[in-house]
Amino acid sequence: MNVQNINFSYTAEKTVLKDIVFSLAKGETLAIVGASGCGKSTLLRILSGILPNSKSNRLQGEISIEGLTPDQYRQTGKLAFMFQEATLMPHLTVKQNIELPFKIKGRGGEQKINNLIKAVGLKEYSNYLPLQLSGGMKTRVALARSFSTNPELLLLDEPFSALDIAWKSKLYVELEKLREETDTTVVVVTHDVQEALLLADHVIVMNSYGSIEMRRAIKSEYTILKRVNNISRYMNSIYEAYMVPIQDAIMNRQDRKNEI
Amino acid sequence: MIGVLLLSTWQYYGSNSQDIRLLLSSPSLVLSYCTENHSILFAAALTTLIEAVAGLLIAVSISFGIMILCFYFSKLMDFVLPIMVISQVIPLIVLAPFFIILFGFGIASKIAMSAVISFFPIFVSFAQGYKAISRNIHELMYIYNAGTWTRIREIYFPLSMPSIIAGIKISCSLSIIGAIVAEFSGAEIGLGKNLYISAIRLEPDLMMSSLLLSFFMGLFFYSIPLIIEKRLIKWL
């Protein structure tokens, strides 16, 4: 993927993205980090071909994905997108939701769907409706759905922001495994720097003016195993930082009660 | 309990007051009238039912047809919806004599009236159901490069179903109203004709039996989308 000098504005008055330049090799993961409203999701929507979607949208610059424009690439069926909200079809079961892109595109397969359901830990829930699932479960369904068509490019828009830390870490590992298996190129938008460092080969930090503030390649440091280990280490540090003090506080309160 | 109380009150005043009997008859008189004239009443009710069902089915088909056209030609919705809303300013019941002239005294004019009056709620509910689908779902379909028919079949139609059924519920009673009002304007047979004659000839037994049949028909008609809703929509 090659992105050259992208400038974008919804209206003539305000530019949302300024001089965005980056490139990404097949199978690599790019994380885009930045504060709310800096244009991360807009950039992702441009890469997916959703934007520009009206005449008032102004897009300058060049984006090439395997030699195609984002819109042409979308039409090849190799693209998958995961929104911040799970965006599940409320009338379909877990299995039917995961199957939906496969049904539409004709890519993937039954075995693949079953493996994906298992991978995200929802085997017992495959006949449940989204109404009967927790927020975390819905995110897991959406993640499985995005892999159901063996995408070659996966765009993730703050996919794990609604999850608790335990499920976040499990899904980081699942994402890594799925990505490694399929050699999928991933672009993930997040405001969580830790998440970006754990998942990505390259990190771009965007400032509030819609430009790239900082760019860092971290590929050499990470392999799938190292990443999983890092995730475990991250989990332990979270556990030590948050859970241990909470446990201590509970124990202290219990001791005080016993004294009384 | 309330029903028994109402029936008892009706029977009491119908038996003891000449005025009430002339105006509302009484349950026992209505029952004996229905028993004596059951074949005539049944034929009238069946005719009205056929007109209402046919009208409703035509309304559903036309609504779906226009919506499908709007899905294929998205700009069409911007024109169609305002026209539909403006058309509702006309009290559609005034079209009944026009349909009698156009289609004659047979059931065709009643079906046309019933279809016209029940079309709007179904169409607008379908349009509203479609408009309520989230932007993310539309974008997801766009990313998956789903064709228009796939979108209609897999997403638009199922997700609009609760709104469509809400519209059909309204149209169920409207279709009966449409058929009965058209029968007022001139018909060979039907509950509307019975009601019209009963008012002219001052026949309270005929009027009350026709009214009760219309009531039960409306109730039966309304229960159908209710059952479909319970069976089909388990995700709300």
Image (cartoon, coloured by chain):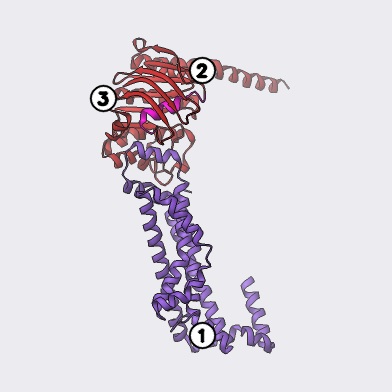
Chain colours: A red, B purple
Mark 1–mark 2 Cα distance, whole angstroms, equals 80 Å
Q: Tell me the element at label 2.
A: helix
- Among numbered discs 2 and 3, the one appearing first in the sequence: 3
SS at badge 3 = loop
Q: Amino acid at mark 3?
A: Gly
Tag 1 residue: B34
Q: Can residue A5 be seen?
A: yes
Counting other residues with Cα less than 10 Å from the Cα at mark 2, is it few (<14), some (14-19), or many (20 or more)? Answer: some
Q: Which secondary structure type mostly characterizes the magenta part of the structure?
A: helix
Q: CA distance from mark 2 to mark 3?
A: 42 Å
1 or 2: mark nearer the eye: 1
Residue at 69% over, 20% down: A256
* Chain under disc 2: A
Does the magenta portion include B231?
Answer: no
The picture places residue A70, in percent across and down from the top left corner, at 32, 29
Task: Please state the chain letter of the residue tagged with numbered disc 3 in the rendered image.
Answer: A
